[in-house]
Every structure is written in C-alpha cells, then in structure tokens.
Amino acid sequence: MPILKSMQNKLTVLIFLIISTISVHASTIEVCNSCKFKSIKTAIEYAKPFDTIIVQNGIYPTTNIIIQKPLTIIGKAMPTLDGLLKGDIFKIQANEVTIKGFNIINVGKDFANSNTAIRIQKSKNFNISNNQFKNVLYAIYLEKSSHGKVVNNKIFGNAVSEINSGNGIHIWDSSNVQITNNYIEKVRDGIYLEFAKNCTIAKNISTQNLRYGLHFMFSNNNVYTHNKFINNGAGVAVMFSKKIDMHHNVFMKNWGSASYGLLLKEINDADIKNNIFEENTIAINVEGSNRINYSKNNFIRNGWALKVRGACYNNIFESNNFISNSFDVSWNTKMNDNKFSNNFWSAYAGYDIDKDGVGDVPYRPVKLFSYIVNKTPETIILLRSLFINLIDFSEKVTPVFTPDFLIDNQPKMKPVL
Amino acid sequence: MFKILKYSIFDLLRSRWSFIYLVFYLLLGSVLLLLNSNLSNAIITLLNVVTVLVPLIGTIFGIMYYYDSKEFTELLLAQPIKRSNIFLGQYFGVAISLSLSLIIGLGIPFLFYGLVISEKVFEFISLIIVGTFLTFIFTAISFFIALSFDNKIKGFSVAILMWLLLAVIYDGIFLISLVYFEQYPLDVFSLTAVMLNPIDLGRTLMLLKLDISALLGYTGAIFKKFFGTNLGSTISFIVLIIWSLIPILGIVWKSNKKDF
C-alpha cells in the first residue's frame, strides 16, 4: 500500500508539473479601453498560439479580423463588438479557436459575399459559445470545418425578405459539429446544413424565421433532438438526405397558408420518433421518402397531420397519436406498401369488446373529403359542412373512393403514451 | 308592434317549447364540455350544431307558431292595427325568444367552464352571433312561407324542404359543380356560392374565427386575400345582415298584399 501511495504522489506531482509548464507557455492578454491593447485586432496580432485574450466590458469597433492561430478569446461581462455594417467580424482559419461571451452587432449587409459575424474556414475543434448576435446577416458560418461546438448562442435577426437575408447558423461541407442550446429568431433559415455529416443539433429553439427553423440539404447521418420549432415559415425542411434521426422535437404553430411542421423530400432511412406536432397547417409533408419509421409522435390540432404526395414506400407509422386534426392523412397515390398500426385516432369510432386496448374494427384514416380536397383544392371551403359529414359517414360504412390499402388494423382505444 | 312583440314573447315563455329548447342547449353545452377535453374542440363541435340545428329549429318553430296563433292573428287583424306591425311583432317575438334560449342555454355551461378567462371567448361570441343571425334568418323565412301557404301541411313541407335545400342539398350541388369544373378558376365562384347560402356563410364566418382559415388560404390568391385578411369577415358579416333583412321585407310585403 505505501508503495502505491508514493506512486500516486509522484503522479500528482508530474501532472502538476505538466500543467504549470503549459500555463507558462500560454499567457493571458487583456483588452480594454485603458489597457495596453485597446483593440482586439492588435491583441490577436501580438498573441502567440494558445494564448487567451480577455476582453473587458465596453464597445469595440471590430471588422474583418482574421484569426490564423489557436486562440481563446473571452468577453468579460458581454463586451460589444460593433461591425459598423462593414463586412465580416471574425474569420477563423485555425484549429482550436474559442470565442466566448460577446455581444456581436451590425454585420455588413452584402449578401453576395454573405457577410457573417463569425466565419470558420477549414478549422477543427472550434468553440463558439455564450455569444449574442444582433442585426447580422449570417451569425455563424462554418465552411469545411469539423469537430466543433456552437453552444448557448442567441441570434436575433431582422430579416424581412428571403432574397436579401441570411441564416442564423450556416453549415457547409462540415462534419461532427455540435449545435446545442442556441436560440435563433427572425433570420431566413434558423440553422442550415448543406453537405454536413455527423452533426448533432440539440435543445435549440428556432422561432419566427422567414423560411425554415432548420434546413437540411444533402446532409447525411445527422441527429436532431429536443429542439423547438415555433412559428416559422416551416418548422424543419429535410431534403435529399439519408439517415437523419429526428426525435423529441416540438413543432408548433407553423401556421400559414403554405406552412409545414416538417417537410420531407427525398429522404431515406430516417427515424421520426417521440416528436410533438401541434397546430401546424400541415404537420408532416412527405414526398419521395422511403423506409422511414414514424413512431410515438403526437399530432395535435393540425390542419393535416400527414400529407403524403407520392413515391413513398416502406414507411412504418406505428404507435402515433392523431388527436383533433382537421385531416389525419391525405394520400394521393394509388400504390402503397406503407404500414399503419397501433396508432391512436381521436376520430376512431369503433369498439373494443375483448378489452385488449385495441379496436376490433379497422380504421381508415383517409376520409372521402380529404380525397376530394386532394383532387379539387377549392372544395375545402365546404369544410365542416353537414353534407361533407354525411358523405364521409357513408364512405366510412361502404368505402368506394378512398384507397382500401390505407388501413390501421389495430387502432388503439386510448392515446399512446 | 312592441305590444304584440311583448305578448308573443310572454306567450312563448309561458309555453313549454322555449324551455325544452333552453334545456336542450344547456344539456348539449354541458355534455360537450364534459366530453371534450378543451374549449376549442367543444366550439368546433358546436359549430356543426349551430349551422344545422339552429336553422332547423328556427324553421319549425316559426312555422308552428304562425299556424298555431292564426286564429288570434285573424282576431287582431280586425282591430285598427297596421298589418305589418302584427306580423313583425309576432316574428320578432319568436326570433328573440329562440335567440334567448340559445344564448342562455349555451352561455351558462360555458361560463361555468371558465370561458371568460380563456382566450376562446371571442370564438364563442362569434359562434353565438352566427347562431342568433341564423335564428333570425330562418324564422323570417319560415314566417314568409307560412304567410304564402294557407294549407298547414303544404307550408310545413315547403319549410322543411327549404331547410333541407340550404343545409344539405345546396352543399351537395356546390361540391359536385366544384369537382366537375375543377379545370376552371373556382375562387370567385365558390366565394359567391358561399354568400348565397346563409348556412354556408355562417359556417365560413366561424371558420375564419377558428383559425382554420390557414387551411383555406393555400388554394389561390383570391382565397388567400379573402380568408387571410379582415376583408373576409367584414364582407361575410355585411352579407349576413342583408340576408336577415330580405325575408323580413318579404314578410312586410306579403302581409300587406295577402287577402285574409
């Protein structure tokens, strides 16, 4: 035992020595209005790799700073970096760069060059956290970068039209990025991923954005969980991507004449689980998407819960709750090998004599009216008319028009928890 | 006219029917709120009831009241009272007492449920307004029909047919023509068709309030303008007022012309 103890002591001494040598190498530079360094630019020029720059509270006009060495730049008490509406603010071209605790305002408006508050190019292990962005075109722009974090940032855009506005967090050709706990409002796309791989997007709130809360293009193997998408042009658009894991998200109040909670286009092999879709015009709009598992989602008070526009095969809809939607399912193709089972439908009027919790009569989620509206959209003006209720009822008793393959043979009697 | 109105209201309040009507709405309101977990759903279900049952009850009540009080009316006609005053007095008596039953019957359960503190209060108020308008319109139409037919059976069947036409058949023809002419632009046609039927008009007004308007908006620019702005509610409201005036004028015209 004493031998072990002495070894342990030696080890602690060794670790202490290593840490102290590192801290001798990395020095701290302070920036404030009365310090030796009055601007961040000069401090960065002076700093050696792995130094820490601490910026005291104040307002610093900062434009087009290029960081080409590993640095940690920390703001004390949220100092303001004012871009003076001229171009970018930070351009990071080195690994291991941290930018933390700044209030970044007034980025240029040149959308041809997509002016950005923090642009990260070909870098690894970056950490952008606890910043606040106001009046920016793009807040954070990642290009060919990987293994970084974007955490706890707040982005307040003021986008008016889609053409001349930017995205909150824009990720292009990057991988292994974690986007966590950010709040994004009033930009074009809250978070935009193009050719991004293995990214995790969690616990963000994206709201009041002009186009999408979250937008995937050609981005495979990504996960997004526990996010909230409220009142956007459309909540989330996932296009031309594979293996996207979507679970525990909330899609709410994406309400407008062409709004979606979730838009899926050309998506294969995805999982959509445990999400809540509430009060969206169309909760999920699906086009050309195959092998997707929809399970344990809640669809509550949407216009359409599921609008399937065709070329969708091998999808499984299992254990979802469809509660008080104007239309549960709208389908416009004649072929189907999708499976509906064990869902709860609030419109289900069957019985359960053997009391096993599963209705004894199959449920057909596509109503005749939903079929008619699909063919002639103007007929929607007759929604909730007595005549429509009558024809829906007679169609339910003797199905003629609605696709007979669309059927839930085990409808649940009570909502799935 | 006000004296006759007063007598009709008292007469109706004494009769069992307005109470049955009241109790029916009380039960309906409470059961709906009990079964539906939230106010919004209860209001949507009530919308179906208001656009179907309220016109039916207004029609039957109006026509029954006219034929029942025909002898009394003829007695009144012998007095030096203006003819239109007699019939308008009776009409408003029926319409007001029916509307009161509706407002009180639905109002009480919703008040107990805590309507005032919820944000749905405006939806509920517009539901009541639509219901009241429909009561006035359909009672007036039924009075007009009753004035036109001395034969009870004939009058009754025409009134029921009128209800059936406006509540069900109209929408059927409407739907078929929309599907048949789907290649053509249908925005203006469908909006006009809605305006020409008070039941559809009331339904549309409620849909506008119930936020379902977003579902309607995606079909075309005219729909979007109509349903997306206040324009739709304003126009629907004005047309609803016109709809309630036309049959009343009809009663006045018919009563002055009719040979008793």
Image: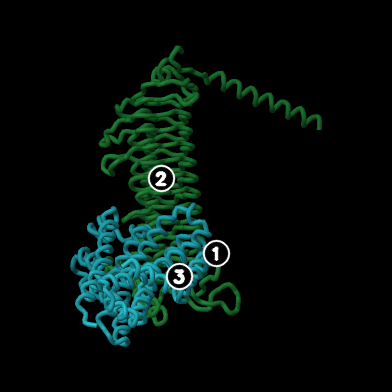
Q: Farthest residue toward the front?
A: B80
User: Which part of the image, by quadrant, shows the N terminus of chain B?
Assistant: bottom left
Q: Chain of mark 2?
A: A
Task: Verify CB contact (< 8 Å) between mark 3 and mark 1.
Answer: no
In the rendered image, which residue does mark 3 sit on?
A: A339
> Alpha carbon of mark 3 to alpha carbon of mark 1: how far?
17 Å
Measured from the top left, where is residue A285 in percent x and y?
Answer: 37, 60
Task: Report the chain shown in cyan.
Answer: B
Q: Residue at x 43, y 15 (%)?
A: A33
Task: Report the chain shown in green.
Answer: A
Q: Give A43 or B129, whichever is nearer the viewer.
A: B129
> Alpha carbon of mark 3 to alpha carbon of mark 2: how far?
33 Å
Q: Chain of mark 1?
A: A
Q: Residue at x 33, y 83 (%)?
A: B71
The disc placed on residue A207 is: 2
> Alpha carbon of mark 1 to alpha carbon of mark 2: how far?
28 Å
Is residue B189 toward the left or the right of residue A102 in the image? left
Q: Residues within 10 Å of mark 3 (few under 14, many from 20)?
A: some
Q: Which mark's residue is nearer the viewer, 3 or 2? A: 2
In the rendered image, which residue does mark 1 sit on?
A: A416
| Three-letter residue code for mark 1 | Val
Query: Residue A365 lies in what quarter of the image?
Result: bottom left
Residue B92, compared with residue A103, is above or below; it is below
Query: Residue A208 lies in what quarter of the image?
Result: top left
Q: Give B254 or A333, whichever is nearer the viewer.
A: B254
